[in-house]
């Protein structure tokens, strides 16, 4: 899904508009109208804006030269409304405009220069129209794709932690708890010592850290598993054999859990009851196909 750029000034607006409309959006029709109104108002204001040069040009331009269009006459040409030139209109209707006409006379050569000016102004006008159309499309699609209807749903995710002190008895599989919630957007979801996936699979990651008790020997090994609770199937496993006799061990594990599955994180410590100040985290992320 195309999204508005953080820095529009250094972004290709045309490509953005093409990418936005090519992805489609499920917004109802009134969202298109609501997001179009600010962009259309800005485009209209730009088109009717004018400067003092436009006023002066409208005051001094000789009569009979026409405006930004040629002198072609035809049934269809007469039916096409001309966009109002506010600056020129103001210039033509300035106070004492009729009196000034008697003092401003243009010869054949200078009138020719005014015709060149007409062509230049016509080119600048259509350049302005192209720029306004580009900005209008960019502003409209930016507002549209910032709306709720056009934003992709974020995947479900959670993160829970446990910070000691605590203890782990050795020689048996333990079911640690991760009670502290960092964030959760189900599914998947977590509840104290087990979790559940929704209609989609989820990538579950857990990490566990243990420390040696001052009165006992270091642990012999550490195993961390992600297990389907109802069937006992091991979905992921990590093992660390503490051959170096480290006083602290940290072990992560990660695996894919199928949809609609209750799962647990289980820990096995080889050794005696000698572990304190455990730390751990369990995280889940929905997999969108």
Image (cartoon, rainbow, N blue to C red):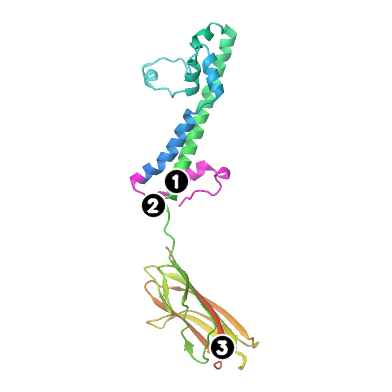
Horizontally, residue 115 falls left or right of residue 25, namely right
> Is residue 3 inside the magenta stretch?
yes
**Place of residue 86 in the rendered image (x, y in percent of width and height, measured from the top left):** 47, 23
Secondary structure at badge 2 equals helix
Secondary structure at badge 1 equals helix
Nearest the camera: 75 or 269? Answer: 269
Q: Earlier in the sequence, mark 1 or mark 2?
A: 1
At a point 41% along the width and 83% down the height, the residue shown is 232
Question: Which residue is at the far right?
Answer: 244
At a point 59% along the width and 85% down the height, the residue shown is 211
Distance from disc 3 to disc 2, alpha carbons, whole Å, reads 51 Å
Label 3: few (<14), some (14–19) or many (≥20) C-alpha neighbours in 10 Å:
many
**Place of residue 213 in the rendered image (x, y in percent of width and height, measured from the top left):** 60, 90
Location of mark 1 (residue): 143
Mark carried by residue 149: 2
Location of mark 3 (residue): 275
Q: Which residues, given as a range, are shown in magenta?
A: 1-30
């Amino acid at each position: 899904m195309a999204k508005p750029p953080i820095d529009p000034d250094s972004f290709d607006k045309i490509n953005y508009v093409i990418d936005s409309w090519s992805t489609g959006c499920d917004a109802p029709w009134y969202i298109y109208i609501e997001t179009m109104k600010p962009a259309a108002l800005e485009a209209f204001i730009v088109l009717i804006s004018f400067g003092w040069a436009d006023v002066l040009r409208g005051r001094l331009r000789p009569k009979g030269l026409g405006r930004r269009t040629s002198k072609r006459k035809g049934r269809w040409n007469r039916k096409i409304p001309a966009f109002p030139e506010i600056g020129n209109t103001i210039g033509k209707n300035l106070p004492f405009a009729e009196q000034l006409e008697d003092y401003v006379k243009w010869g054949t050569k200078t009138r020719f220069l005014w015709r060149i000016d007409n062509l230049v102004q016509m080119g600048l006008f259509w350049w302005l129209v192209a720029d306004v159309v580009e900005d209008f499309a960019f502003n409209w699609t930016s507002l549209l794709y910032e709306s709720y209807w056009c934003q992709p749903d974020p995947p479900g995710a959670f993160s829970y932690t446990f910070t000691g002190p605590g203890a782990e008895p050795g020689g048996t599989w333990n079911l640690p708890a991760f009670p502290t919630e960092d964030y959760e957007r189900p599914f998947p979801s977590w509840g104290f010592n087990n979790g559940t996936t929704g209609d989609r699979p989820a990538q579950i990651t857990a990490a566990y850290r243990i420390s040696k008790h001052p009165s006992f020997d270091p642990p012999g090994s550490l195993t961390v598993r992600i297990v389907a609770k109802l069937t006992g199937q091991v979905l992921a496993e990590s093992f660390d054999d503490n051959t170096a006799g480290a006083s602290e061990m940290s072990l992560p594990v990660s695996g894919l859990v199928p949809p609609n599955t209750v799962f647990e994180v289980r820990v096995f410590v080889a050794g005696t009851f000698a572990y304190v100040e455990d730390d751990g985290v369990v995280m889940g992320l929905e997999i969108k196909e």
